[in-house]
Amino acid sequence: MIRVGIVGCSGYTAIEAIKLLLRHPQVEIVAATSRQADVTSLADMHPQLTGRIELPVENLSPAEIADRCDVAVCCLPHAASAPIVAEILNSGCRAIDLSADYRLSTPSLYEQWYGPHPDPGRLGQTPYGLPELFADAIRSSRLVAVPGCYPTSAILPLAPLVKEGVIDPEHVLIDSKTGVSGAGRSPKLASLYSEANESLAAYGVGTHRHQPEIVDIVQRYTGVAPGVVFTPHLAPMDRGILSTIYVRPKAGATANQIRECLATRYAAEPFVRVVAHLPATKHVAHTNFCDLTVRENGDWIVLISVLDNLIKGASGAAVQCLNVMFDQDQTLGLGA
Amino acid sequence: MIRVGIVGCSGYTAIEAIKLLLRHPQVEIVAATSRQADVTSLADMHPQLTGRIELPVENLSPAEIADRCDVAVCCLPHAASAPIVAEILNSGCRAIDLSADYRLSTPSLYEQWYGPHPDPGRLGQTPYGLPELFADAIRSSRLVAVPGCYPTSAILPLAPLVKEGVIDPEHVLIDSKTGVSGAGRSPKLASLYSEANESLAAYGVGTHRHQPEIVDIVQRYTGVAPGVVFTPHLAPMDRGILSTIYVRPKAGATANQIRECLATRYAAEPFVRVVAHLPATKHVAHTNFCDLTVRENGDWIVLISVLDNLIKGASGAAVQCLNVMFDQDQTLGLGA
Amino acid sequence: MIRVGIVGCSGYTAIEAIKLLLRHPQVEIVAATSRQADVTSLADMHPQLTGRIELPVENLSPAEIADRCDVAVCCLPHAASAPIVAEILNSGCRAIDLSADYRLSTPSLYEQWYGPHPDPGRLGQTPYGLPELFADAIRSSRLVAVPGCYPTSAILPLAPLVKEGVIDPEHVLIDSKTGVSGAGRSPKLASLYSEANESLAAYGVGTHRHQPEIVDIVQRYTGVAPGVVFTPHLAPMDRGILSTIYVRPKAGATANQIRECLATRYAAEPFVRVVAHLPATKHVAHTNFCDLTVRENGDWIVLISVLDNLIKGASGAAVQCLNVMFDQDQTLGLGA
Amino acid sequence: MIRVGIVGCSGYTAIEAIKLLLRHPQVEIVAATSRQADVTSLADMHPQLTGRIELPVENLSPAEIADRCDVAVCCLPHAASAPIVAEILNSGCRAIDLSADYRLSTPSLYEQWYGPHPDPGRLGQTPYGLPELFADAIRSSRLVAVPGCYPTSAILPLAPLVKEGVIDPEHVLIDSKTGVSGAGRSPKLASLYSEANESLAAYGVGTHRHQPEIVDIVQRYTGVAPGVVFTPHLAPMDRGILSTIYVRPKAGATANQIRECLATRYAAEPFVRVVAHLPATKHVAHTNFCDLTVRENGDWIVLISVLDNLIKGASGAAVQCLNVMFDQDQTLGLGA
């Protein structure tokens, strides 16, 4: 059995990770940590887990976590995560980090968008948690950086198409819409029900950290840095991301050819479904699937990508990476 | 023109009050107060008000408010409101208080549920802001206490039926469901979109402050204290309250007779609609209406009451009371 | 492997049944039937199933179904189901019926609420699909009637308490709230998004078929017919039922004692969780759990019951019954 | 008083039109027509209107409508509307048509997207119901075509910017998201609550009729036909449209300059608010406002436009046009 610790177990990604791992035949969750003082157990903290897992919530040190676990799934905020992850790794345990701290290629890029990096050596050496693109690197690594939710939805369709040269990377317009769980579980005005319900709004226009992440990773995969314009929007639903991506075809590629290119590229990947119909976020909710389709309109190609921001956009990807790291079938614990 | 000040202008009831008063032909909003430091104007604080009203948000003292206004509509939290309201009244200005501070009949009852009262003399002398039942007292008062949202939905059907002796007051089971705006605008975990959406839960079972308020006011109106069992529930919508009230009929009264009793009692009231169909909260959303109907099931009478918690349950009632206090048509500013 | 056929595969209960059975290690779905002409496969009919199951949708006769399957999970409408189920049984196959056709005890009761019964002989001989109460009968039967969603939420707490004599069965007031998927998938005005969203309403007051079902089954289990007053409400969410049940305690039983009674009764049942906190429907969404708690308010006991109307209220119960019928662990395919 | 008839009073646009006109001091609603046989009055058909208007629902002929009214607000489906509108006009009454039948410039364009036009003579002679752009033509016309909801949200920002030459009209990518009421009130699978809730999906990609409408009207206003790529999406809310529009600036225009251009153009228009913040659909819900802002991201300009699809996107625009046609203040009946 793979002994897993959930580091920072109070948020949505932690809850989803726990629920997925409870179904994983090779995993035993052996630790759940939090600095919250007033909770005793996971069921106490998350009533939905009553009777499904008996585990205290403890304020463990990285060394204690490393001692008890084979791998730590870290659900801590950006900047707070890296110091903990670094210690966990130094103590000999593997780590799957859901924060942004190890995703980017260089410390200077991280510094531009997040601030000085606490563990710059590992940055740039850490595989990006998309097995569809980086399985070999993930397999041989002790640390994996789980992608941002929006970036997964954009990189999965874009990276192969840029690599194949069937789309023009110079203008890539990504219009993304997310459910509110993507904003996390800390009480903030904008995340209140009566603020977000029955409303749709753009945010972070031109300033969102996921834009440089998308560019960085596509460049890592293809050698080409796309000219990305990324606009996130908050939509009145719990979960789901739909990204509508506008690109110009190259070399007279048609929508059908571009869809074929994706279908071929992902034919062997269990969690990417290239479909002919227009996918809804509800089709993939509570699953690790990312559904992709391709349309054309005038001179433009319209790529549509849907996924569940908490699953394929976070905790499902974490479990998928865990499976790769531990040489398991990628679908273990992730359903059919 | 009636000069109105909005005291505490950051929450949902304040926003609704402002929007209603903007349509009121006899009202001018002359002050909006808040202790929030980082906002300059109402439109700055509430972007939806852009271009609809030009008014700075100021941290005014009660005396300053009283000096500028004919009446202050106070949207402050319980316990915090009474001291401010008292000073405003002492400075010669009228006040309409949306908090619970002046609703109950005795300081000891208030103390039981809220704590020591800052202005006990006025408690018990203050009319309860339901013009359907207390119009004369409201008309001649300088201070009115706007009811709690749930109490309005329950008292409107119950009070006349208890008074007429057509229902047994001993067992009154009130099962209420509210939209999330009733929880207010301060960032709290339970009010987060991803907590409240796609979920329904009871809360405050046996402990909710609106239960003694309902008993107290029905007794004030009828002389009889009903045996109320009140269960509130949080429902995944912005606004609306539906109360399903189970009572035993007295003297062989039928559902039709009981509905007739309500229809007669409220025939002249512009905002209570006694209907034959089963009303939905959406029928009254964004209006000051309370819709009532009556059904029977076995030995029990089932009363159903719907209203908009922010309008008839709060700010619409405030405007309705303002109209009574200033001898205007009750419907001014409250649409048709 | 247990070969399962889904009879009538276009609705929500069918989709949920398929998703649950896909995770069931002992089940193979071998048939999916529909009279819809324009679909070829399950994935064609339900895009979310793309790549998860390859199965044509066929218009099979009951005999063809029986020939291919060990058990048919029937998701047909009331009255339409019984003739098909009867033929399937006559052809030697087992059946799990999600309609109301075999739930009630007598043909005359069925006739009162649904119309003449097409297969009266089997009515009254068919176990009610609540393994928590009727496991033995289910185990030895070739036909099981899956309960109505609301009845499950009410019967699970009521039946043991009536049997134990700790509550007064004469007045049982059940105030239930359901998500809209309970209304089914046929296009009806009341089920439209813009009708149901942001709204709450009661329906079927005094006339809902689930009221006699609750009475009938509690009587079947306890010998006592409770005086039930049942009020359903439509709530703006996809799934979930919360039932707030008002009863009088007997013999001075306290809320704690009543909760203990339930906790003891259900200690060995994997899917009933008797909890101390107030449960939300979200705690049990997408699971087969029913969470129960007990409170008191004045002279009344307040029971609260939550479940997912599509899972424990329908398709999860169907799978749970399948497990019992085929001597499997009840939790197979139903997660943790 | 202006006597108004509502032709086709069962749908959402009709309900909104009625509610707006009830607040209009110069309007009296004198007729409401429907072919629905089983309703007697407006309140009978729409319970929310109980006590707000006493008016029978009648199956009137166009001549009867024309006889009773000064203007008919027609809420009929496309293709069904034009014959009725034509007769109403021929009988001497004015008409405001909410269908698409009179929006486009040429019968051949209409035929391409809708089918043969029943009244081609008037097509091309009919002003488009955007007073911000076409007030003079509206003022002197007896027939006005209310725009499509999506087109209003796109044309208001685009038309002046194309006219001023500050954006490149060759590539205009419009990513729009709408609430479900835009789909209308007829029972369809895709409009069911359990289909649309908790989900987001694109539809009509490359095939939506509003794309040619946007091109046609911008060309009508500016002389230039923009290269529009329009992608609509269905979002899980009742009402609201947010359009995110990606364009290239011309002549080095910055986002600030472009916003200034819009602010200047619309300074005198009561219902277009050019704002600095990122507007949410909730800011304009239940109002006739369209809020616009401008951002830049890389080489691209991002225009954001929000409105209420039922108000500024339909019935509010209808009332606004009525005011222009009858020489009233544009804001009458449309609040502040």
Image (tube, coloured by chain):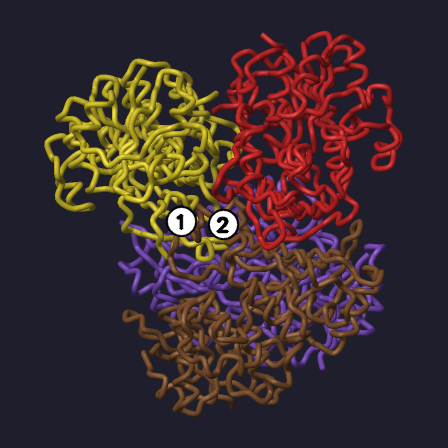
Chain colours: A purple, B red, C brown, D yellow
Residue at position x 24%, y 38% in the image: D100
Q: Is residue D102 left or right of residue A6?
A: left
Label count reads 2
Marks 2 and 1 close (CB-CB < 8 Å) = yes
Q: Secondary structure at mark 1?
A: strand
Say whether residue A136 is visible: no
Quadrant (top left/top right/bottom left/bottom right) for the C terminus of chain C: bottom right
Q: Is residue A300 left or right of residue A214?
A: left
Disc sitting over residue D233 in the figure: 1
Query: Which chain contains the residue that carries disc 2?
Result: A
Relative to D277, residue A116 above or below: below
Q: Amino acid at mark 2?
A: Lys
Say whether residue C332 is visible: yes
Q: Position of residue C201 (x, y in %)?
A: 53, 47
Q: Is residue B303 left or right of residue C167?
A: left
Residue under circle 2? A177
Residue at position x 69%, y 61% in the image: C170
Relative to D223, residue C121 above or below: below
Residue at position x 67%, y 53% in the image: B201
Q: CA distance from mark 2 to mark 1?
A: 10 Å
- Which one is in front, A215 or C197? C197
Quadrant hosting residue B225: top right
Q: Amino acid at mark 1?
A: His
- Which one is in front, A143 or C267? C267
- Which one is in front, B202 or B261? B261
Q: Position of residue C68 (x, y in %)?
A: 40, 89
